Image: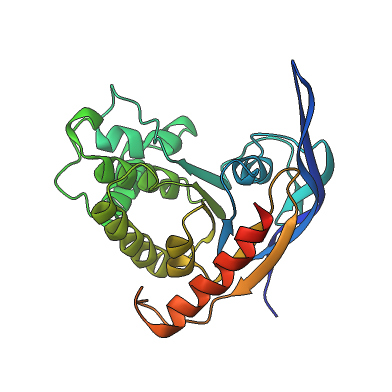
Amino acid sequence: MRKKIIECSRVSKEFTTDRGTVNVLQNIDLDVYENELLVLFGPGQCGKSTFINCMAGLDIATSGHVTVNGHKVEKPGPDRGVVYQRTALFPWLTVMGNVEYGPKCRGMGKKERREKAQYYIDLVGLTGFENAYPSKLSGGMQQRVGIARAYCNEPTVMFLDEPFGHLDAQTRYLMQEELIRIWEKEKRTIVFVTNNIEEAIYLADRIVLMTNCPSTLKAEYQIDLSRPRDYTTPEFLQLREEISAVVDKSI
């Protein structure tokens, strides 16, 4: 029996604006399992980012609740790593300085944290760039630093919010392959947000389809395609057509 890592129970979220109350999420129930790579997929601006922010503790649900490993989420914590489309690396720190930052803040000794950081720098393919500053790195390399930094905290769950959205197509495909390689080596529960259907199918163990706001969960798909996946196989294209048709109806 698979272990539940995240449990979302009737999660709703609303924001108060100058134009009144905006309902973003409405009574969402969702379980996420150990070592699962779950993709949240849906139209742009449908609340996917708000949903993972509630799971990560960066936002608090207006009603309902989220638990991670049985503990109610009320604030951010080191058991939850987040990587955004813009990595927000510290520009005054090197690659090593950025990756070791979390363990350093927690008081880990220099030798131990450097060894840990080096492991994850090597894991994401940045060996030799330890002393480089973010401004000297490409977009894909910066995302690798962001992933290494999140992994270095050894979180239970990784939340990735459209991390490859601003990359060129070739780099995006490469980073998708790299994410799968890293995930298979360093198993973590991953919740990945995208509005790119090919990316969703390429990465996911399971795709959860969200509707427009106020967002609910419309459907889910267990992706049983073997890895590495090929965008051009009949099975891949059939899934793309099936899911795209349902998304079109929700727009």
Nearer-the-camera pick, 121 or 164: 164
In the displayed structure image, the side of residue 17 where residue 187 appears, left or right:
left
Residue 71: x and y, percent?
Answer: 75, 50
Query: What residue is drawn where x is 22% and y is 28%?
Result: 135
Seen at 35% across and 39% down, the residue is: 99
* Residue found farthest to the left: 128
Indicate the position of residue 236 as horizontal and vertical percent values.
44, 77
Up-down: is 36 above or below 212? Answer: below
Query: Which residue is found at the position 61% from the left and 39% from the top?
Result: 77
The front one of 236 and 49 is 236
Q: Where's residue 94, x and y in %?
A: 24, 31
Q: How is the image coloured?
A: rainbow
User: Is 221 on the left-hand or right-hand side of 170?
Assistant: right
Mark yes or no: residue 34 visible.
Answer: no
Corner quadrant of residue 183: bottom left
Q: How many marks?
A: 0
* Residue at position x 48%, y 68% in the image: 201
In the picture, the quarter occupied by the N terminus is: bottom right
Q: Please, is residue 75 above or below residue 227 in the view?
A: above
Asked if residue 114 lies left or right of residue 29, the reply is left
On the picture, is 143 further left or further right than 8? left
- As displayed, is residue 36 above or below residue 85? below
Residue 224 visible in the snapshot? yes
Q: Measuring from the top left, give residue 182's x and y in whole percent.
A: 36, 62
Foreground of the two, 104 or 1: 1
